[in-house]
Image (cartoon, rainbow, N blue to C red):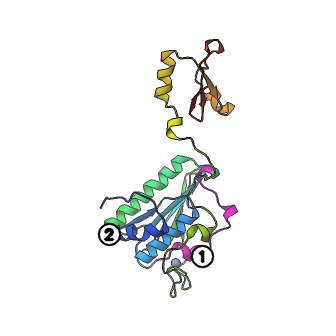
Amino acid sequence: MSAVHSGPFMPVTTLDPVRRYDVVADCSDNVSTGYLVNDACVLAGWALVSASALRLEGQITVYHYDGGLCYRCIFSQPPPAETVTNCVDGRMLRVVTGVLGCLQALKVLKIAASLGPSYSGSLLLFDALRGHFRGIRLRSCRLDCAACGKWPTVTHLLDYEAFCGSLATDKCHSLQLLSPEDHVSVTDYKRLLDSGAPHLLLDIRPKMEAVLASLPITAESKINSKLSLFCCGLGRVREC
Ligand SMILES: [Zn+2]
């Protein structure tokens, strides 16, 4: 068994790998996965080291450790799907996720070393703008929690995308990505530039990005009957 699980985290496949590991860390950025990981940890009897961040703020806690509360004890119902954002849409200073990720790794190591977590039953808030850390106490377990309560109704993993009304991914499914063979790498394009092959480079990025850095645009006079068109930003190369 590898030290870290690598692979899809779906309701039909999640419980088994969770049971085979000693510590689970939720590093996802969507609500559906949050409920999935929480319920899997409660069913497996494991603690969950959960961290999240948005813009210039982040938070970290440890759920379901030694009889402590779980995610559902606080959030019994998912928020309306239209109010939920993710790291991409909500904007994120990635240094903030780095800070939270280091703290999360520390909690994982402490649990693995039987040193106990620092934030079971409490929440550490990080304000990157002010440079402040603040800890707040969380409520105790809810007796009527659907996952860890006295009469749990979550006895198996569910369809969490249906439960939350949102996808368990930050990917845009309507986005039509080009196939790998339709991309051109920087190295390949540099090779083509050096070869002097006639082509037109079409930069379709926003102007603000073009101002920061631009590739040389091939002069129109160099174009002859066989034209290769590159769309910088989409990575498309096509002969026409
Ligand atoms: Zn609970």
Q: Amino acid at mark 2?
A: Ser
Please, what is the three-letter code of the amino acid marked with disc 1?
A: Ser
How many badges with numbers are in the image?
2
Residue 162: horizontal and vertical position, in percent? 61, 69
Around disc 1, counting alpha carbons within 10 Å, would you say few (fewer than 14), some (14 to 19), or many (20 or more)? Answer: some
Query: Residue 115's image quarter?
Result: bottom left
Q: Quadrant of residue 53?
A: bottom right
| Element on which disc 1 rests | loop
Disc marking residue 175: none
Disc 2 residue: CB within 8 Å of ligand 1: no
Rendered location of residue 200, percent (x, y): 61, 22
Quadrant assignment for the C terminus? top right
Q: Which residue is mark 1?
A: 76
Q: Earlier in the sequence, mark 1 or mark 2?
A: 1
Residue 135 visible (yes or no): no
Q: Is residue 129 magenta?
A: no
Q: Is residue 155 depicted above or below 126 in this figure?
A: below
- How far apart marks 1 and 2 lie (CA) works out to 29 Å
Is the N terminus in the top left, top right, bottom left or bottom right quadrant? bottom left
Task: Quickly name the residue at label 2.
Answer: 114
CB-based contact (under 8 Å), mark 1 and mark 2: no
In the image, what residue occupies the spot 61% across and 28% down?
Answer: 212
Q: Decide if ligand 1 comes within 8 Å of the CB at mark 1.
A: no
Q: Position of residue 90 (x, y in %)?
A: 64, 52
Q: Nearer the viewer, mark 1 or mark 2?
A: 1
Write down the region rendered in magenta.
68-88
